[in-house]
Image: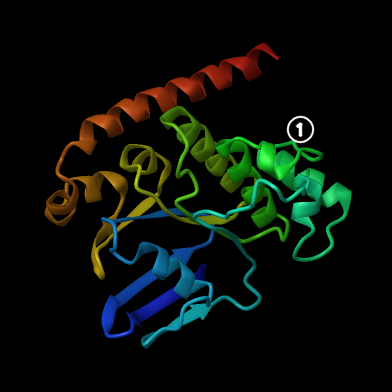
Amino acid sequence: MSLIRAKGLSVRHGKTTVLQNVTLNIAAGEIVTIVGPNGSGKSTLLRALIGAVETHQGEIIQKDGLRIGYVPQKLHIGPTLPITVERFLSLLCKVAPKAAKSALDQAGASTLMQRQMSDLSGGQFQRVLLARALLGNPELLILDEATQGLDQSGSATFYRQIEELRTSLGCAVLMVSHELHVVMAASDRVICLNGHVCCEGAPEVVASAPEYRALFGSGTQGALALYRHDHDHHHHAHDHKHEDA
């Protein structure tokens, strides 16, 4: 079932065309990643889909009553602003402590409820932003470079959390990322964007497409294989743990 569809989408900033004739479709339960060089319109596309950017041409069709959770690229909170994680989660609308705790649990941030936002590490901060996006029980989770500033192992852990959320909540995930090796392994489908859709498909198909290689070279193939090995190893270890229990 289609959750959100864009048809022939074009976006301009002033006289500059940022996106030209972009068509995409996100189905229930799938993980789709948008990759592309800097300035290729990735963030603009996400913001257009949630209605934060005006489109010049084309249309966006959402499933009736679609619940979207959005994790922005970055959010700056001044170090002098005293605000706990619990209070931060209630900024937009009042959230019951039980709901806040549940969202933090799902985001892998269960111990952070009473911490000051300004004291959190980069990874903890991103998990709190993820928890905020989960409060409305989204059918579609949209993440814009949510692991910016995290090291490779922090990024891989964060993406595993996203995969687990997709399984446990049954939500679809649409994300933008520049970490090709991690993204490729975590995605069902990859869309390569450079102002327009250059190519799309399963990760392995996109990784070997000439349009993709023209933008990124072919160096991610090895990294993709390496990540898959680590990823599978992690899951096997996880399975053994369950067997022991």
Rendering coords of residue 10 (x, y %): 33, 81
Badge 1 amino acid: Thr
For residue 110, side relative to residue 224 (left or right): right
* Count of numbered labels shown in the rendering: 1
Q: Residue at x 66, y 36 (%)?
A: 108
Question: In which quadrant of the rendered image does the C terminus lie?
Answer: top right
Q: Which residue is mark 1?
A: 111
Is 81 displayed left or right of 97 in the figure?
A: left
- What residue appears at the point 79 percent right and 40 percent down from the top-left corner? 113
Asked if 51 appears above or below 158 in the picture, the reply is: below
Taking 118 as reference, is 95 above or below it? Answer: below
Q: Position of residue 125 (x, y in %)?
A: 62, 43
Residue at x 31% of width, y 26% of height: 226
Say if 172 sits above or below 128 in the image.
below
Q: Residue furthest front?
A: 80
Name the element at disc 1: loop
Q: Nearer the viewer, residue 42 or 39?
A: 39
